[in-house]
């Protein structure tokens, strides 16, 4: 079915033959003109089919839930391989702010937290609700590095900014934070799935699963570096955070997992059934190849509009009348105050780009 190219290595060291993007694109069914993965990703056929089958089983009550739970564990393992960490260091949940809440609650009183001004609020509000005891400061994104170097206790930032597509200088921020002794908290929701990165460089890395990972909404992952895990209280712990979930249904003894699973929240089963095949497909294609594909399309879009090339799958351009022009052409992209945010993923094509460019040129 697929034409494969150079092999890669899995976490276990096994060779994985990768799938070429143009041979995989038939697994998606987008209506031409979808340029808004930064809002939500589109499901591949294997994920869609698996979710429909699970919903049918639920409707008829023909199976138990354990198989759906296996999808959660498959998604956790696949995500861990994508970001280069052990699966035992990854917790699963539903929303970023929910998974960040125990981290923010664990930071001592008086600590200084630095974040970009335009940071998406799921990585900002959980800190700001503690402003009665934490010193939360937001700075222009181009001053984040110097602000961290000047001294802080926590730096919270997005690896790729949702509003602009700007890619953070991850190694430099990590180096400055380590020199300052600061905890590093990263929102990689707009990066994971197209931008290769090493999550283990940070202390906490959160990813929403419904964007570039192309899973249903209600899936999220958090990497907890073992060096900080013991300092964070799992305040949302329930049965799924148990050392053995099948022995954690009833109390009173608390038997939490020894690893990051202690931060798990009971999964929304059907969302995970759809998420696991999508992540598996990302692994089959390879994130490096997806990055090259996405950035090439983004730069084709920028170049056709007379803008310089960039290094992101998310780009923004000023375009008067953009909302009306794009809508008339059937292009779906985010438009805010006349500024277009276009985002390109594995299922995007040159035809999508050219259609959008023609619409914006009027």
Image (tube, rainbow, N blue to C red):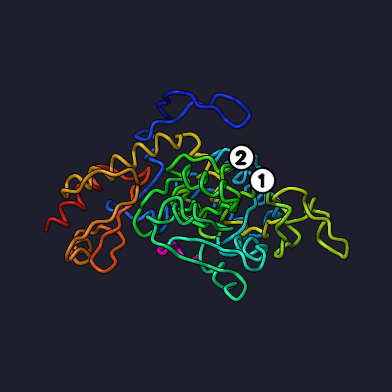
In the image, is 342 to the left or to the right of 219? left
Asked which quadrant contains residue 185, the reply is bottom right
Residue at screen point 65% across, 47% down = 225
Q: Which residue is mark 2?
A: 85
Determine the secondary structure under disc 2. Answer: loop
**Which range is magenta?**
117-121
In the image, is 29 to the left or to the right of 68? left
Q: Are marks 1 and 2 in contact (CB under 8 Å)?
A: yes
Residue 263 image point, x, y percent: 69, 56
Query: What is the CA distance from the residue labelled 1 to the residue labelled 2?
Result: 7 Å
Q: Residue furthest right?
A: 253
Q: Residue furthest left?
A: 362
Looking at the rendered structure, the number of numbered marks drawn on it comes to 2
Residue 311 image point, x, y percent: 33, 43
The quadrant in which the C terminus is found is bottom left
- Say if 127 sits above or below 264 in the image: below
Q: Residue furthest front?
A: 150
Based on the picture, tell me whether residue 46 belongs to the magenta stretch: no
Residue 228 vs residue 341, the one in the foreground:
228
- Say if 30 sits above or below 124 in the image: above
The quadrant in which the N terminus is found is top left
Q: Which residue is mark 1?
A: 89
Residue 121 image point, x, y percent: 47, 66
Residue at screen point 42% across, 45% down = 169
Give the number of the disc on residue 313: none
Residue at screen point 70% across, 58% down = 232
Residue at screen point 38% across, 42% down = 346
Asked which quadrant contains residue 248, the reply is bottom right
Based on the picture, tell me whether residue 118 belongs to the magenta stretch: yes
């Amino acid at each position: 079915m697929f034409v494969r190219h150079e092999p890669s290595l899995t976490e276990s060291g096994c060779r994985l033959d990768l799938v070429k993007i143009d041979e995989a694109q038939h697994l998606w069914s987008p209506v031409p003109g979808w340029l808004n993965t930064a809002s939500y990703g589109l499901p591949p056929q294997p994920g869609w089919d698996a979710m429909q089958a699970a919903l049918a089983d639920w409707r008829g009550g023909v199976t138990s839930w354990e198989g759906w739970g296996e999808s959660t564990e498959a998604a956790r393992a696949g995500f861990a391989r994508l970001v280069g960490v052990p699966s035992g260091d990854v917790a699963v949940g539903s929303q970023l702010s929910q998974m960040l809440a125990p981290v923010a609650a664990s930071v001592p009183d008086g600590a200084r937290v630095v974040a970009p001004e335009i940071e998406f609020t799921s990585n900002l509000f959980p800190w700001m609700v503690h402003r009665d005891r934490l010193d939360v400061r937001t700075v222009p994104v181009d001053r984040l590095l110097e602000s961290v170097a000047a001294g802080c206790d926590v730096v919270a930032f997005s690896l790729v900014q949702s509003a602009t597509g700007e890619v953070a200088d991850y190694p430099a921020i990590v180096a400055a934070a380590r020199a300052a002794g600061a905890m590093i908290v990263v929102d990689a929701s707009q990066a994971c799935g197209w931008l290769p990165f090493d999550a283990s460089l940070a202390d906490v890395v959160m990813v929403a699963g419904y964007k570039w990972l192309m899973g249903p909404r209600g899936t999220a992952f958090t990497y907890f570096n073992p060096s900080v895990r013991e300092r964070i209280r799992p305040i949302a712990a329930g049965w799924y955070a148990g050392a053995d979930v099948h022995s954690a249904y009833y109390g009173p003894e608390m038997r939490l997992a020894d690893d990051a699973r202690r931060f798990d929240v009971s999964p929304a089963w059907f969302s995970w059934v759809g998420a696991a095949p999508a992540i598996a497909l990302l692994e089959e294609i390879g994130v490096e190849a997806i990055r090259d594909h996405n950035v090439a399309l983004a730069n084709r879009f920028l170049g056709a509009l007379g803008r310089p090339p960039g290094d992101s799958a998310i780009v923004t351009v000023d375009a008067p009348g953009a909302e009306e022009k794009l809508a008339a052409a059937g292009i779906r992209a985010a438009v805010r105050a006349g500024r277009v945010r276009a985002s390109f993923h594995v299922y995007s094509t040159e035809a999508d780009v050219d259609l959008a460019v023609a619409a914006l040129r009027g």
